[in-house]
Structures are given as C-alpha cells and as structure tokens.
Image (spheres, rainbow, N blue to C red):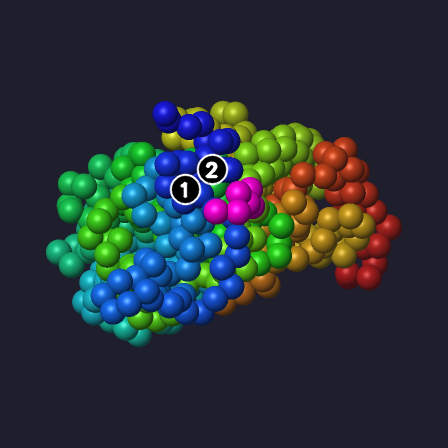
Amino acid sequence: MDLAIETKCIYGNKKDWKKDPTGAISFPIYQTATYAHPEVGKSTGFDYSRLQNPTREHLEKVVAALESGTDALAFSSGMAAITALMEIFKPGDHLITEADLYGGSIRLFDNISKKNGIDFSHINCSTEDVESYVKENTKAIYIETPTNPMMNVVDIRKIADIAKKHNLLLIVDNTFLSPYFQNPLTLGADVVIHSGTKFLGGHNDTLAGFVVTNKEEISEKLRFIIKTVGSGLAPFDSWLLLRGIKTLSIRMERAQENALALVEYLLNEPKVKKVYYPGIKGTKGYEICKKQARGFGAMLTFEVESKALAQHILKFTKLIPFAESLGGVETLLTYPCTQTHADVPEEVRIANGITDSVLRMSVGIENKEDLIADLKYAIDSYDGYKAQYI
C-alpha cells in the first residue's frame, strides 16, 4: 500500500525494511568499520563502512521514500553532498544557478567548482528569463525554493520544462521546506539536495547532507563518488537522523504554525520595513507555493528600519538565540551579512537584498506567544538604548 508521508517518516516504504532478529524497534547503530565474509566470493552485502553501513543504508531508504526517489545518499554534511554532486560535471560545463543561494553554496561554486573548470551564471530564477541563459555547454539548472535568505519562490514545474527542453538536469535544494512540505522530484526535478543538519535532523545536534535522485545513471555516478572520496555519513549520525525524521511531520506543522503567528506580528510592527515569507497572501510566492507545496514552512526573513536596530534585536532577545543554522526545535535568529553570507561579495549580497538590516529567523516549536513576546521586547526596548549605537 502507498503510505502517507507522516507514516513514511517513521517507516520509510516499510517494504525495504530488513527485520532485526532481536525485534528492536529503534534501528540499530552498526558501529563497525568492516565486515566478515563467510568465504571467498560470498558476502553479507556489506564490506567496508566507507562503501555502506546498515544504519546509513536504512536512513537512505527512508529519505528516498520521503522524496519519492529511487536512491538517496547520506553525506557527512550538506556541503559534502553538494561537493560530491559537483563531481558529476566536468571542466568546461556550465550551470545556471539561483543568485540567492545559501552562502556556502555560492562559496563552493565560485571558489572550488570554478577552479575545477565549471562555469556558472548566477541569476534570479523567479524573475529572470532562465531559458535565455542556456548555452551549448549548459548541463544543469540549480535552484533553492524558497531561497536562502530572501525566501524567493521558484516555479519548479516551469524550470523543469525548460530543463527537459534543453536536456539539462534540474537540481533543487529542498532544505527549507523539507520533504514533508515539498517533493521536487514529483514536480520534474532530477536531483534533490538537503542539508540533513536542518529540519530532517531537527535537533541541532549533528551534521548531515543528502542527495536524492530518480535517475539510475546519476545514482551510479554518485555511489562511485561517495565510496571514492569517503564522505558518507557515520553510523551514529545516521541513527540520529533516523530518530529526528520520526518527528518531522509534527515538528514541521508546529513550527509552521508558529511562523505564521510571527509573520502576522512582524507585518504589524512599525519598526519592521519588510517581511519575506511564502505564506503571505497576495504575493507571487504565495500562489506558486500553494501550487507546488503542501505548506509554507518555518523560515522567514525580515528587514528592520536600521542596522543598529537589527544588531540590538540580536543582543536583546532573552529566549531566542543569535546563532547560525536552522531547522531545529529551537527558534534561531541569524544575521546573514556576517554569518551565512559573510563570504559573498558585498555588492552581490546587497543586490540580492541582504542588507545589514536583514535578519533571518528559523522558527522552532516553542510556545508562539513566548516567541512573539521575546521579539517584541527586543524591538520595543530599542528606543531606550539608541544612544549606545550612535
């Protein structure tokens, strides 16, 4: 039977499960580097944990089920996953990428991938004519939706049609909405990326990354790459991800509920100039997100009236930590210009809207009234502390 996504978070597709002889409900941690063979020419199916490990294999099957993919590969971090994916391209290849990407992705593309002979066109895929950037050597289109941190929503089906017309791969970073709210492979994408550190793990306690695909050729290439470069996820971290994913559905629902409440507060706060969230009715992003996703997620970005106010908020929240990362049960405030996008050239950052008065918020599962009260206190207390910023 076809399981609902809430059930898949716990069991994957179930049919892929190998029952543990002990009857353990929690999938075991196979903390081993190597495996004994019965005799020459026979194997248990596992040889060496750099190639594969039972705990990692089970995690990969769960994530593949969540994204409706035929294969998923678990890496030691989100950046390790993207780095491995870039190895399927060769010198002279060209990729079209969303301009408003996570700063670490931009850093990788501009400093490592370009050094390796890959060319990039960074454009706004939600507003520009993507097809006009296709060249003879273009091999793929790489997007995030919603984007990090400006929450631009890209029409996946529209970009997928362009990719198929020109025989290109469509790669979608689905970290912000998670597979609970959005499944790009079902919308025409060929590859999905996740920073598993974020919503999939959900507890800010481990790093992980995933590449999911429904293309056998890509799967084979990536399997060769992961065993060659040795960036697969360790057994204990794989188990932490399995545990985190079990509560993905209820965490995403609660975090989204809190995000909607915070957005309503921020939209009515005079010191807030702009709020960026795909769930705001009347926006272009709202209509696209409604069409291709089951929810709006728990990420939001807002711009306040000054740099001084932004920095004051980061200092004076009592409950919400000022920290990098996202997707955990704790709400976090991030300052993109000095954290996630510090290595992005200033002119590029500002052109994308990431000014020094922009804050990004990953909304957690706390009581929403407590979160609003904390943010309100930090904003309202600014007038009494203005002098120290002048």
Instruction: Name the dominant secondary structure of the magenta segment.
Output: loop
Residue at the spot 54% in from the left edge and 29% down from the top edge = 280
Q: Nearer the viewer, residue 231 or 172?
A: 231
- Amino acid type indicated by mark 1: Trp
Q: Residue furthest bottom?
A: 115
The residue wearing badge 2 is 11
The residue wearing badge 1 is 17
Question: Of helix, strand and loop, which one carries label 2?
Answer: helix
Task: Confirm whether residue 195 shows in the render.
Answer: no
- Contact between marks 2 and 1 (CB within 8 A): the answer is yes
Measured as percent of width and height from the top left, residue 368 is found at: 72, 34
Q: Mark 2: few, some, or many residues within 10 Å (few <14, many ≥20)?
A: many
Q: Residue furthest right?
A: 384
Q: Residue furthest front?
A: 39
* Precedes in sequence: disc 2 or disc 1: 2
- Amino acid type indicated by mark 2: Tyr
Q: Give the position of the N terminus as an image quadrant.
A: top left
Residue at the spot 65% in from the left edge and 45% down from the top edge = 329
Question: Of helix, strand and loop, which one carries label 1?
Answer: loop
Measured as percent of width and height from the top left, residue 156 is found at: 33, 37
Residue at the spot 62% in from the left edge and 57% down from the top edge = 205
Is 205 situated above or below 199? Answer: below
The range drawn in magenta is 21-26
Residue 374 in which image quadrant? top right
Measured as percent of width and height from the top left, residue 347 is found at: 46, 62
Q: Give the position of the C terminus as an image quadrant.
A: bottom right
Measured as percent of width and height from the top left, residue 53 is found at: 41, 59
